[in-house]
Image (cartoon, rainbow, N blue to C red):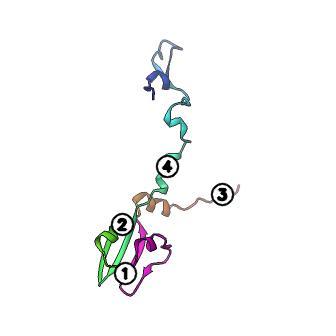
Amino acid sequence: MDKLRLSDLVEVSNNSRLTQNRIKPLERKPDHPAACRPKGMASKMRKKMKTKIFHLQIDGKNKYYGSLQAVFLDNEDLGVSKSKLDRHDFGKPAATDRFTLTRAFIKTAGDVRRSKLKPRKLKKV
């Protein structure tokens, strides 16, 4: 990959004596890695990335894990296979007579702010 030069991104304008060093941004060059990604893609990717939490209730104890693998490494005798829980739709909890396993997502401050925003109604003129 070629090194990115300042001249690739900006152009110096010499239109007047007062603005001899004014910098104008240019369009992204197609071979630049950031040009391959559509505008606003980073914010869309950020919205999609949510941290999962698995909540295991077993023997009257509550345990919290970041992955199913961690659940099975810490609790070897659950009585159900990991592959079965991999295929489980966590819209409802996975429950047996020994344990209950639910999945939830962590809410960030941005998630809470976005949920409190109400769509504005436009006034008819």
- Residue found at the very far bottom of the displayed protein: 97
Marks 2/1: CA–CA distance: 15 Å
Within-10-Å neighbours for mark 4: few <14, some 14–19, many 20+? few
Res. 51 image quadrant: bottom left
Image-quadrant location for residue 109: bottom left
Q: Is residue 125 above or below residue 17?
A: below
What amino acid does circle 1 point to? Gly
Dot 1: element: loop
Q: Depth-wise, is mark 2 or mark 4 nearer the camera?
A: 2
Q: Amino acid at mark 4?
A: Ser
Front residue (pair 76, 5): 76
Residue stretch in magenta = 80-105
- Labels 1 and 3: the sequence-earlier one: 1
Q: Which residue is mark 2?
A: 69
Q: Secondary structure at mark 3?
A: loop
| Residue 65 falls left or right of residue 110 | left
> Distance from label 1 to label 3 (Cα)?
60 Å
Q: On screen, 92 above or below 119?
A: below
Magenta-drawn stretch contains 85: yes
| Disc 4 to disc 1, C-alpha distance | 41 Å
